[in-house]
Image: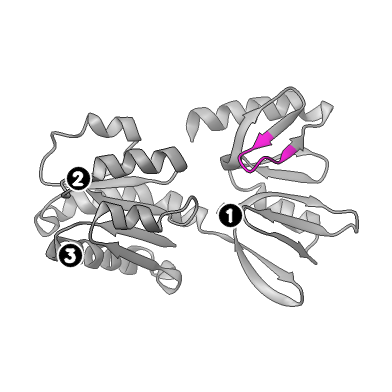
């Protein structure tokens, strides 16, 4: 799991990072071994290092000099619609404004005086993050690798009858069977089997046409005739509840 925190006040940045680590260590100790926590001293620095899919959670101070946390969130939403964004603030005046960027929550400063609110916000956010942090354990080119489910765009069977995992920046052929992969992916609410031996990650869908899904990377994934009605229902439900 990778979390980024941006705050232009060194003390507040340190406290936020410390509280996040303490919370995860206490509530989700299994996450600690893979936790990466990046800290930034301004919004511009965060944006320079941001890429879609890179972070699982962003914590942004609203009142930063030059670019504010709210402005940074607006820029991030142009690249990524789904990454949870939580704001650090000394005031609740921006609660309504946060709806424009689909804020996942607010943390009131100083955090040491609002620990109950901090825990409640993290309790609300973390279960979904932990679930999305699950991995596909597969053998690729003779090496055992962990492929985060959130990085999978779709999986299919190639012309050599091998399971192929399509990521946003790579394609991996693995010895894992389709049925094993299917069992794991179909437990996740964001995966859909839209065609025989093709499973897509609905987080990467750009739009649904009559007979295919157009993915954000330009891939065109066919929808089988017999699955069309079911696929449409599942995708509409996903859009409403994501």
- Which residue position holds label 2? 62
Instruction: Place residue 175 in its image quadrant.
Output: bottom right
Which range of residues does the magenta coloring cover? Answer: 214-220
Comes first in the chain, label 2 or label 3: 3
Q: Which element carries disc 1, helix, strand or loop? A: helix
Looking at the picture, how far across and down is residue 170, in whole percent? 67, 59
Q: Which mark is residue 15?
A: 3
Task: Depth check: give the residue in front, 108 or 22.
Answer: 108
- Residue at figure coordinates x 37%, y 56% from the top left: 48
Q: Earlier in the sequence, mark 3 or mark 1?
A: 3
Q: Residue at x 21, y 44 (%)?
A: 68
Q: Position of residue 54 (x, y in %)?
A: 47, 57
| Residue 115 falls left or right of residue 222 | left
| Location of mark 1 (residue) | 151
Q: CA distance from mark 3 to mark 1?
A: 30 Å
Residue 2, x across and y down, in percent:
42, 62
Q: Callout 1 environment at 10 Å: few (<14), some (14 to 19), or many (20+)?
A: many
Residue 27 in which image quadrant:
bottom left
Name of the residue lying farthest toward the bottom: 142
Asked if residue 38 lies left or right of residue 221, the reply is: left
């Amino acid at each position: 799991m990778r979390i980024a925190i941006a705050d232009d006040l060194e003390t507040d940045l340190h406290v936020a990072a410390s509280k996040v680590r303490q919370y995860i260590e206490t509530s989700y100790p299994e996450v600690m071994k893979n936790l990466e926590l990046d800290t930034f001293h301004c919004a511009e620095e965060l944006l320079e290092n941001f890429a879609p899919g890179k972070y699982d959670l962003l914590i942004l101070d609203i009142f930063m000099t030059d670019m504010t946390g709210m402005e940074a969130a607006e820029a991030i939403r142009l690249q990524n619609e789904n990454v949870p964004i939580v704001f650090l603030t000394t005031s609740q005046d921006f609660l309504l404004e946060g709806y424009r960027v689909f804020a996942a929550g607010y943390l009131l400063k100083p955090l040491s005086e609002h620990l109950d609110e901090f825990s409640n916000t993290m309790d609300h956010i973390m279960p979904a993050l932990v679930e999305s942090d699950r991995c596909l354990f597969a053998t690729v080119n003779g090496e055992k690798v962990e492929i985060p489910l959130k990085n999978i765009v779709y999986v299919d069977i190639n012309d050599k009858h091998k399971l192929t995992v399509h990521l946003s920046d790579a394609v991996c052929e693995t010895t894992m069977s389709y049925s094993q992969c299917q069992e794991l992916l179909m437990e996740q609410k964001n995966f859909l089997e839209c065609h025989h031996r093709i499973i897509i990650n609905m987080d990467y869908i750009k739009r649904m046409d009559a007979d295919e899904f157009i993915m954000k990377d330009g891939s065109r994934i066919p929808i089988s005739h017999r699955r069309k009605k079911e696929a449409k229902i599942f995708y509409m439900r996903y859009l409403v509840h994501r």
